[in-house]
Every structure is written in C-alpha cells, then in structure tokens.
Amino acid sequence: MDRLPDPSSEPALVGTFAHRVLELLCQHPGSERTIEQAKIIARDAWPEFSEDEDYVALGLDDDQARAFRWQAWLAVTGLWRIEDPADVEVVSTEQRIEVDFDGVPFVGVVDRVDRLGGQLTISDYKSGTLPGHRWRHEKIQQVMLYAAALGAHTGERPARARLLYLGQRILDVRVTQSRLDDAVNALSETWVELSGACEREEFPPQPTVLCGWCPFVEQCPEGRAELMARSDAGSLPAHAPAAALLVA
Ligand code: SF4
C-alpha cells in the first residue's frame, strides 16, 4: 500500500536459485536426474542468476557469495535425501495455472506436477526449515489451493499434495474434497476481506510474532511495539532477524 520496495532476502534468493536448478533438472529424462547433472545445470545457470538485480542488491563479497552458492547447493542436493528424482514421473515443472473460483481469481505456479503410482500429485519445494505443527496448516492450505486449481484446470483432481522440505522430509497430504473446500473457502474469505479493505481504504496492522521476520518492521510502529512487548515477555524467538534491531 505504501509502495515500499521489497528488499532482497538472502534465504529467499537461495531458494530461488535452488528451485531453478531443480526445475531444469526435472526437465531431463529420469535417468539423467543425477547430482552430477545438477552440478552442470547449477554451473551453467549461475552467471545469469548472479547478474539479477535482486542478487546484486545483496552486495555479497567473494566469501559471502561462496557461502551463498554452498547454501543453494545444499538445498539442491537435499532433494536426494528425501526422494530419488530419477524415479519420479514428472508431468510438468513451473506450471502456471490461472482459474476463477466462483468469482475469486487465483494465479499460481506449481513447482512440479508428478504422477506417482498413477496418481496426479502436486509437489512443492521448500528450502526453508520444516515448520512446527502449529504453522503447517497454512502451508498445506497453499498446496491444497494448487490442487484445487489444477483440478479445475485439467478436470482431474490430484490425489496427493506434497511439500518437499529439501534435506529434511516430505510432508505428504492426501487431497480430499473437504480439504479442497476448506482451502477455497479460506481464499474466498480473504478475498472478501481484502476487497472490503480496498473499498474502505483501511489496512490496519495485525502484529504477531511474525513481525520478527517482517522487512518493514522499522517503518511500522505497531510491529516495533509488538517486538518490544514480546522481548520483555521473553517470547520473541532469538533467531528472528528483527530481534537484532532491539539490541541495536
Ligand atoms: S511489522 Fe508486523 S504489523 Fe507491521 S507491517 Fe510488518 S507484519 Fe505487519
């Protein structure tokens, strides 16, 4: 709303590069989806990626750039710790899907659509840490929306949706009509709320513990107050990037 520029985020860009390598890898036949092939793809993709303005904006020196590439490589090779991509029947990669859920527009890009055991499956790479149980629902809702959109787009409802936490584990969720309905209903409610807020031009801040990860917290008095209150109560995670602001 304030048109503040979205700052570059190193963890997000590590994920972007790893996604790109895995996307290109999975366009190869199964027998060629090897770590050696991934290394060749990463080497070829790096020059273009390293000139991207978001990456350049990080301003990394040589050692930091080497650490960045190592983090991305760990994410890429983390795929082999949770599945063997050679065995996956890949239907599509980075498939953009645009559908309309009863007047609610939805646009999504699905990392990978697979056919596993004959069943259509959504596979979504995650380069971050597997969230605790409390935070998983939102991630599952996201892949359920992809499943609903793919079903509406192709006429075939996916049977499974999988969150591939690279190097950690796969969260594999069965797609049911009730989970699809929950996800689409939640999207509709958000759409109604957003439409109302846009009409009223009212966007009240909603501070939570996630303000600790918000890149705009320095410009947000409510967010800073939330962090102070949590810090005083000892409930602000020490690894939240914004925790450093309070020390400063
Ligand atoms: S600091 Fe918190 S309340 Fe403020 S914009 Fe960020 S997430 Fe919203």
Image: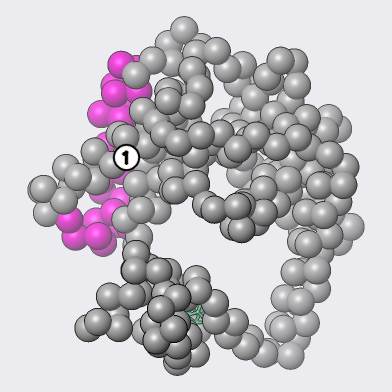
SS category of the residue bearing label 1: helix
Pointer 1 local density, CA inside 10 Å: few below 14, some 14–19, many at least 20:
many
The location of residue 56, given as percent across then percent down, is: 24, 56
Tell me which colouring the rendered structure shows. one colour
Residue sitting at the far left: 62
Residue 108: give x, y in percent of width and height. Answer: 65, 48
Given residues 219 and 135, the one toward you in this image is 135
**Residue at the location (39% across, 82% down)?**
231
40 sits left or right of 128 in the view? left
Q: Is residue 165 above or below residue 135?
A: above
Q: Is residue 219 visible?
A: no
Residue type of the residue flagged with mark 1: Ala
Q: Magenta part mainly helix, strand or loop?
A: helix
Q: Residue furthest top?
A: 31
Residue 82 visible in rendering: yes
Observer-nearest residue: 184 or 134? 134
- Of the 4 image quadrants, the one containing the C terminus is bottom left
x and y, in percent, of residue 184 in the image? 81, 55
Identify the residue shown where x is 61% and y is 16%: 89
Q: Residue at x 55, y 13 (%)?
A: 87
Report which quarter residue 17 is drawn in: top left
Judging by the rendered image, the residue that carries numbered circle 1 is 72
Q: Is residue 8 above or below residue 41?
A: below
| Image: 115 above or below 15 | above
The N terminus appears in which quarter of the rendering?
Answer: bottom right
Q: Is the residue indicated by label 1 positioned so its CB lies within 8 Å of ligand 1?
A: no
Magenta segment: does it hold 40?
yes
Magenta residues (range): 36-60
Residue drawn at x 75%, y 69% is: 190
Magenta stretch: includes residue 17:
no
Q: Position of residue 23 (x, y in %)?
A: 48, 31
